[in-house]
Image: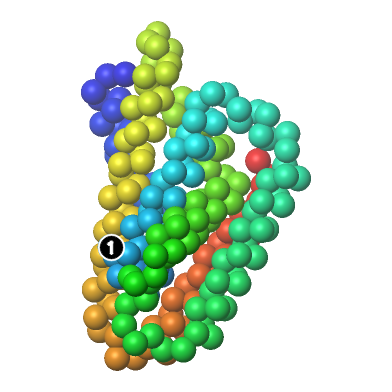
Amino acid sequence: MSWDTYALYLVTLGVFFATPPGTSQILIMTNSLRHGLRASLPTAAGDLTANSLQIMAAGFGLTALIGQSAEALTVVKWLGVAYLVWYGLRVWRSPPPDGLEGRADPSAPRRLFAQGFLTSAANPEAVFFFAALFPQFIDPAQALAPQIAILGATYIVVDGLILVLMGAASERLLGRLRSRGRLLNRLAGGAMIGAAALLGAKDVRAR
């Protein structure tokens, strides 16, 4: 892979991430709005862990096999939708917080990691996206595995930076809404239900 090709890949990622926020980005924004950025970093870690597994699946040529299991992917997708709706309604109905939630709860990091992982893993498009994206920048005359590793690692780094920036922006908003806890919960809960709608709109069978 030449430097020119790698630079084009970075530009492509920039264009891709310039689109409206997806489900995982909405999730970390919601958790940062409620808990603060630092307490919500496990959410980003869970999302990136799921992405890493999806990149490996695409890299090992499992896309065709997964594509034959549309029914299983559909079940996973709707389980993810149901979870996001349940969580969004729970946040919406919860009492106004006295401060930033989750910082004193030792189970919070595991719970937020699981949220990030499950939300990303329930996305039926991810493996197909990576399998379609990477070949555009791979030189068939060179070893395949190192190129996939570079492309995949770059995606994880860029995605991680964007998640942190979005979480930081949400944390700044928290300072302005702290005195209006019920509004804060409704914004966060509504965002999660919106993320569920985005995930539900993704069509597995169309791929």
Q: Is residue 161 visible?
A: yes
Q: Is residue 121 left or right of residue 154?
A: right
Quarter of the picture containing the C terminus is: top right
Q: Residue furthest front?
A: 106
The spot of residue 187 in percent (x, y) is 43, 80
Q: What number of labels is visible? A: 1
Q: What residue type is disc 1 on?
A: Arg
Q: Is residue 117 left or right of residue 11?
A: right
Query: Residue at point 72% right, 44% down?
Result: 72
Q: Is residue 43 left or right of residue 204?
A: left
Quick check: 137 above or below 103? above
Q: Residues within 10 Å of mark 1 (few under 14, many from 20)?
A: few
Depth order, front residue of 163/50: 50
Quick check: 206 above or below 34? above
Say which residue label 1 marks: 38
| Residue 177 figure quarter | bottom left
The spot of residue 148 in percent (x, y) is 41, 25
Depth order, front residue of 95/196: 95
Q: Residue furthest right?
A: 71
Quick check: 151 above or below 24? above
Quarter of the picture containing the N terminus is: top left
| Residue 154 figure quarter | top left
Query: Residue at point 54% right, 74% down?
Result: 88
Query: Residue at point 49% right, 51% down?
Result: 117
The spot of residue 183 in percent (x, y) is 40, 88
Q: Is residue 33 visible?
A: no
Query: Residue at point 27% right, 19% down?
Result: 2
Q: Is residue 33 left or right of residue 23?
A: left
Mark 1: secondary structure? helix
The spot of residue 120 in percent (x, y) is 51, 51
